[in-house]
Image (cartoon, helix red, strand yellow):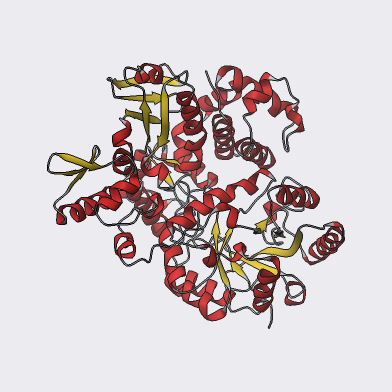
Amino acid sequence: MAVHNTDVAAIFEEMADLLDIEGANPFRVRAYRFAARTIRDLPGEVAEMVARDEDLTSLPGIGDDLAGKIQEIVRTGTAAALEVQRKKIPKTLVELLRIPGLGPKRVQALARQLNIRSLSDVQVAAQAGRVSTLPGFGAKTERHILDALATRTGEESRVQRAVAMPYADALVAYLQQSPGVGRVMVAGSYRRAQETIGDLDILVTARAGLAITDRFVRYPEVQEVLAQGETKASVLLQSHLQVDLRVVPEESYGAALLYFTGSKTHNVVLRHVAQQRGLKVNEYGVFSGEVRIAGDTEESVYAAVGVPWIPPELRENRGEFEAAKEGRLPKLVELHDLVGDLHAHTTATDGRHSLKEMADAARRRGLRYLAITDHSRRLAMARGLNSSRLLSQMEEIDRLNRDLTDMRLLKGIEVDILEDGSLDLPDDVLGRLDLVVGAVHSRFNLSKQKQTDRILNAMDHPHFSILAHPSGRLIGRREPYDVDMSRIIRKARERGCFLEVNAHPERLDLTDIHCQMAREEGVLLAVNSDAHSTADLDDRRYGVGQARRGWLQKADVLNARSYAEVTRLLRRTMEP
């Protein structure tokens, strides 16, 4: 049984959730969450480290106990401690934590006082008005629970694109090793860089007569074969991810890739454009009558209907055809365009690596600057910095910068935006920084008016540079707080400050729609990793995917600018 980093991380996250509901020591819970993120963000597979008998305790946050559990998971696919915990607390209770506003203590209360054990139980109880009778809940919370349950319909089977990526990469590599196989490409919403995907669609070209579907269904991670024929097959992996394979001829590869990449609405418009020219487009090619005139490449398909090639991330029927016909398609930002990162953490708060380690990792990735933005004092669980600790860190950054020749560290803070819009540290300290990244970390349930005013007030502060993860969402775990994003974007334009595209795969915040809105308003966006470890710096690739879906070009991205230019722009936000 193949075990990927995401499998180990998922077990540790479930352990943390179950312990949280049980009311276990919070430091023990944090240890599991810390370990989950460490394993998930490793550049290589932890199973390979186990196979090479490497010392797992060399990994940040991994002691002897967790190292032993990792070895056990790699060998068996599970952990005995998890099975024990599952018997104590039903796994279905963990799902309750995914409902906004239901933390561990509230889940405990629901389980103990209303005997709730599943999502359906809590829905029935809320509809009957029994949830609002519990201390600490009330009618508003009950309404939020029902609204959240309504929005979850159909979402449970989707996974984050970042979670699916290692499975996709491994399967593509496996198929490419087959003699006679030509091109292998993952299509669908995965190729369009959507935040979540329902399944993987893989297209393959192969030599005639090659039994590629036989090799596909024999992939070691296949749990169940759902269907199989000569040119297509469908399987369920051990990770419960469904994968559909289609074998296509070279002459139809481009048409099939375009068709199976989607989106459906994009393809509908494409077919309509073709019909206006007396042509027909399908997964086999572009046809004039019975004659195929294009289809071997995507470019040939678009050219046949009089449209320039449209990048996959833009294929959502949000104006891409009009832009293509008018020559307005953006030259989308690329990962290599990012020369800096303006949001990163260290061991001073809840990061896993020191200042120097983060600087070295950024330099190895070709970055010219990295902003250190540890948490402020309000975020106690992250050991947030007070004024004196922040000033000490600033001095340490100055010392490090004297020795750095090819990159620079910027002095910053991720400061909490308090409920009234004030910031969590005094002005005389904030004014000495290179940038201030403001973030909402509490009171997510304020009304739309109050939440919007809170953030607008913070952006009016004389020392405010970037609004971090502007909607506060955690994909699949926490809905965005209710805020008027159009007003936030306009305020950023008026104030001359910036908004973040947080690249962490659980956030991807701003959304693609709001990225596009900000671009149209002329607001620069910072595509930041929000790194809590050296490996997290690689999360920038997910942020770039989100930025591309939002039509962003290099010129729209703050940290695609040189050190001299970005510091000039940041300095303007820090001037009273």
Taking 397 as reference, is 282 left or right? Answer: left
Residue 305 in the image: above or below residue 90: below
In the picture shown, does residue 553 fall above or below 135?
below
Q: Which one is nearer the viewer's eye here, 498 or 361?
A: 361
Residue at the (28%, 47%) spot, across then down: 301
Q: Position of residue 13 (x, y in %)?
A: 57, 36
User: Residue 118, relative to residue 570: is it above or below?
Assistant: above
Residue in the foreground of this view, choosing between 279 and 167: 279
Residue 69 appears in view: no
Q: In this view, does 223 lie to the left or right of 402?
A: left
Q: Nearer the viewer, residue 1 or 555?
A: 555
Picture quarter containing residue 562? bottom right
Residue 505 visible, this orientation: yes
Q: Is residue 540 left or right of residue 269?
A: right
Q: Assign the C terminus to one quadrant of the image.
A: bottom right
In the image, taking residue 550 as reference, residue 264 lies left or right, namely left
Task: State the image coordinates of residue 84 (x, y, percent, origin top left).
Answer: 56, 23
67 or 21, which lies in front?
A: 67
Which residue is painted at 70% across and 45% down in the image?
A: 534
Q: In this view, does 500 lie above or below 456?
A: above
Q: Residue 559: where, in percent of width, then height?
A: 61, 63
Image location of residue 511, percent across then percent down:
45, 58
Residue at image position (69%, 51%) is 366
Residue extending furthest toward the bottom: 576
Count of numbered circles on the image: 0
Residue 25: quarter of image: top right
